[in-house]
Every structure is written in C-alpha cells, then in structure tokens.
Image (spheres, helix red, strand yellow):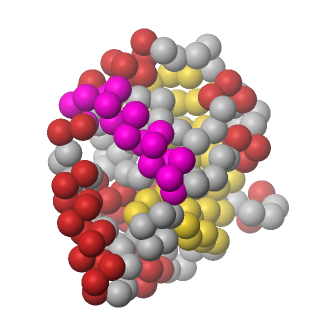
Amino acid sequence: MSFLFKHPKLYKTKMNILNRINDTDDITQEVRNKNVIIFGSGFTNYNFTRKVTKKTVGVDISKEFIEEANKTKLQNESFFVEDITKRLDLPSKSFDICLIPFVLHHIREENHIHVIEEATRLAKQRIIIYDHIRNSNILKSTVQMIYWKIADGGLKYRTEKEWYFLLDGRKYVTKRYGAMFGNIIKIVIKTDKKCGRF
C-alpha cells in the first residue's frame, strides 16, 4: 500500500492532479439531491460539488482519512471508519447512489464481488465505479504496472476483459479515458429496473 495513505492531504493533492490530467468527468448532475454513500471516501476526494447532494455518507478503512474528512465536513456529510469488505450496519436501499472511486484495486481480489454486492444492497438506483484498467498491450501494461507499483500500491489492476468478467450478469455501461493509454474506466451499474436511463 502506498505511503500516501498515511498522508491524506498529500494523497488528495495527488488525486486532484490526476483527475485533471486524466480528464475525469464531473458527476455533480448525477448526484444532485441524491443520498450518496461513498466506499473508500478518503479525504473528501470525489469529482462532484460536495454541497449538491441531499446526504453523503463516506466510509473508509483509513482512520487518518476519516479524521481529516471530519475536520472539513459539510452539513450534509458524515464520515465513518468502516471495512467495506464486510457487511455494513446500514439498511438496504438506504441510498440512491453508491460511489466507489479508485478503491477496488486496493482490495484483495476475492473481496471484489462482495463489495459490489454490498453496494447493490445499499443503492436504490446505481453504482458508479471509477478504477484503473490495465492495457492489453504488454509494453503499455508494463509501463502502467511500474508506475502503479511506485505511485499507487494497489493489489489488482484488471484488464478490460477481467472487468467484464467481474461484472457478468449485471446491467452496466462503461466509459474509458485517461492520459496513460486509456487507464481509467468508469462503470455505471443499474441497481433498480425502475430508475430509468443511465
């Protein structure tokens, strides 16, 4: 795991820079007036205007990140130290959206399905996942893996095929972008047939 996880402000700076470089899309309109839970919320590191949600609950395993988040939380926000690889003590369908921003690659692979199932249990409308995607070209993949080993410290970086295998049987759409060979994937999973268009 990257040393940056012990330094929330430095991590947030890194993420802000990478979001600009990678042109990560703003999801303010998607979360406006919604109840949102963020798995791996970090230190208020997300790509939407914080005040527009009806309610935001952030959960993260990092005590340091949650302490920092609680110092600057807005009235509509609350943050808790929680392990998302376990069932959370929250009622089913108590949020509209579950956001999972650049978290799954830091979690052991055998827990990925549980995390998505728990997000499905909690989200009435959709799950939005942002994560890295490993290039299928061996040379590009090698460059990515060297960079990620130095700067990120994740456990599992999936290829496009591996992402599709993980999501098998779910209704979802994807978008790829990123400065390093299209290294970012956005996945939107519908959790309710009645929630309309993506």
Examine the structure image and report whether residue 16 is included in the region drawn in magenta.
yes
Q: Position of residue 142 (x, y in %)?
A: 24, 76
The residue shown at (47%, 39%) is: 16
- Compared with 68, 41 (above or below) is below
Along the line of sight, the residue nearer the viewer: 50 or 22: 22
The residue shown at (21%, 31%) is: 6
Along the line of sight, the residue nearer the viewer: 39 or 93: 39
Q: Quadrant of residue 141?
A: bottom left
- Compared with 7, 98 (above or below) is below
Q: Quick check: can you spot residue 117? A: no
Q: Name the side, left or right, on which 45 lies relative to 195.
A: left
Q: Which residues are magenta?
A: 5-22
Q: Residue furthest bottom?
A: 137
Could you tell me which quadrant the C terminus lies in?
bottom right
Along the line of sight, the residue nearer the viewer: 134 or 89: 134
Examine the structure image and report whether residue 141 is included in the region drawn in magenta.
no
Q: Name the side, left or right, on which 91 lies relative to 39.
A: right
Q: Name the side, left or right, on which 175 lies relative to 108.
A: right
Q: Position of residue 67 (x, y in %)?
A: 34, 18
Q: Position of residue 44 (x, y in %)?
A: 48, 30
Q: Quadrant of residue 110?
A: bottom left
Q: Quick check: can you spot residue 76? A: yes
**Count of marks overlaid on the render:** 0
* Most frequent secondary structure within the magenta stretch: helix
The residue shown at (76%, 44%) is: 29
The residue shown at (33%, 36%) is: 11
Q: Position of residue 143 (x, y in %)?
A: 27, 72
- Compared with 102, 29 (above or below) is above
Q: Name the side, left or right, on which 165 lies relative to 76.
A: left
